[in-house]
Image (spheres, rainbow, N blue to C red):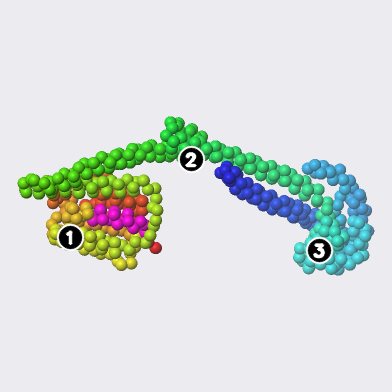
Amino acid sequence: MPIAIRIFLVYFLFVGLSGWFVLSTVMDEIRPGVRQSTEETLVDTANLLAEVLRDDLQSGKLNQSRWPELLKAYGVRSPSADIWGVQKTQVNHRIYVTDAKGIVLLDSTGQAVGQDYSRWNDVYRTLRGEYGARSTREDPNDPESSVMYVAAPIKNGPRIIGVVTVAKPNQTLQPYIERSQRRLSWLGYGLIALGLLVGALLSWWLSSSLRQLTRYAQAVSEGQRAELPRMPGGEMTQLALAVEHMRTELEGKAYVERYVHTLTHELKSPLAAIHGAAELLDEELPDASRKRFIANISQESTRLQQLIERLLRLAQVEQMQRLEERVKVPLAELLDSLIQAQAPAIEQAKLSVELQCAAELSLLGDRFLLRQALANVLDNALAFVPGRGQITLQAERCGQAVVIRFFNQGEAIPDYALERLTERFYSLPRPRTGRKSTGLGLNFVAQVIELHEGQLHIVNVEDGVEVMVTLPLAG
């Protein structure tokens, strides 16, 4: 499935579900919101009527006053009002008044006069000094027939002498609720559709940019001349520049790799010739000359062989993008084996080698590469320590890593050389022989440590040089 479709589907699910949830939640809140607003208006109306009716109720002339006639006239009024597109043609309030015992004294419908309403919550709670309100269905089987009743006390000083109730059918609010829901639906679904359209355009733009970069990368990999595609800015431009930079680096690296392989091939021929000459020297020659030639040829052939092997290992490591395996490598055992492998050279130079490493420390990585890299570091330490000198290998845990320190006594490394020690073919003369090495050892070490996401530091310290290698700790 193309990435554009996948992005759009994820966007569609997120925007669609979020929009639907928000819209449905708001839609569900419209009805109670309208009813709460209406209830607030009924409270004001009931309290206003309570003040207006107080004097007539207190004097006992409520039924003899003009109130019955006024309420009857109110009930037949036709407002002819246009409220936000909804036509209102009749009034819907019902008003009734009870005395302090809950007996209905006045009813705008004329139906309940004389009845006992003291058990209805609006009257019952108001007479007790509480907020009186109720919602009652006119038809018990019809949930749409409910009516809101809100009461207010009629007081003579602190004493409650009666209750006035204002009622309004909830069904009369339905046109306004439906109108709000209808408008909100159009607006909500329109916004969802707009959001999905933006998502589709974003997916198309991202997919188009990625297709351009893919075509460019394929052209470069096939050796074609390709122009870097122009991106509309932002992260895509950075990605395009990164791809271009990667192409440049890979071309340079490919050149170096070809150079290494060519050099390796060229070295094999003289190496074979040297070995052939060494065999011919078994014929008639003075003993002194024979021994000298044999020693020189053997020394040079060994050096050339080391150069070939190190170049091959270095080329192999440089071509690796990641480690093929990561295993647990006991560190103390590894360092001890490296020291034992160098035991003849250590004994010959009368060196003192000290190993400080806890038995439980282990590295996480490629066993072979780690051994080769640490062996190169130890080789360097042995090459630069003077006779009867001191070498110390110390390992300690630091968070989720292991820090290995190789210290060797000897002269300090010149400042100009410190930054170049890991360069390929760069080497310093060995103190005991005055000769340089291949200059590939520390470069190989740096490549291996980088593959393991570690760090390599070489610094001058008191009385010598310290190489600090940081590698991942095995859990």
Q: Residue at x 48, y 40 (%)?
A: 235
> Looking at the image, which is closer to me, 390 or 323?
323
Alpha-carbon span between mark 1 and mark 2 = 58 Å
The residue wearing badge 2 is: 235
Residue 343 percent coordinates (x, y):
19, 61
* Mark number displayed over residue 372: none
- Element type at mark 3: helix
Residue 77 located left or right of residue 35: right
Question: Dot 1 lies on which element?
Answer: helix
Q: Is 429 left, or right, of 248 in this rendering? A: left
Q: Which residues are magenta?
A: 364-378
Residue 421 visible? no
Q: Residue 197 location, x and y as percent?
A: 63, 40
Predominant secondary structure in magenta? helix
Q: CA distance from mark 3 to mark 2?
A: 66 Å
Q: Secondary structure at mark 2?
A: helix
According to the image, label 1 marks what residue?
344
Name the residue tied to disc 3. 122
Which quarter of the image is occupied by the C terminus?
A: bottom left
Do tag 1 and tag 2 residues touch (Cβ < 8 Å)?
Answer: no
Three-letter amino acid code of the residue under disc 2: Glu
Foreground residue, 251 or 245?
Answer: 251
Comparing 380 with 106, the one in front is: 380
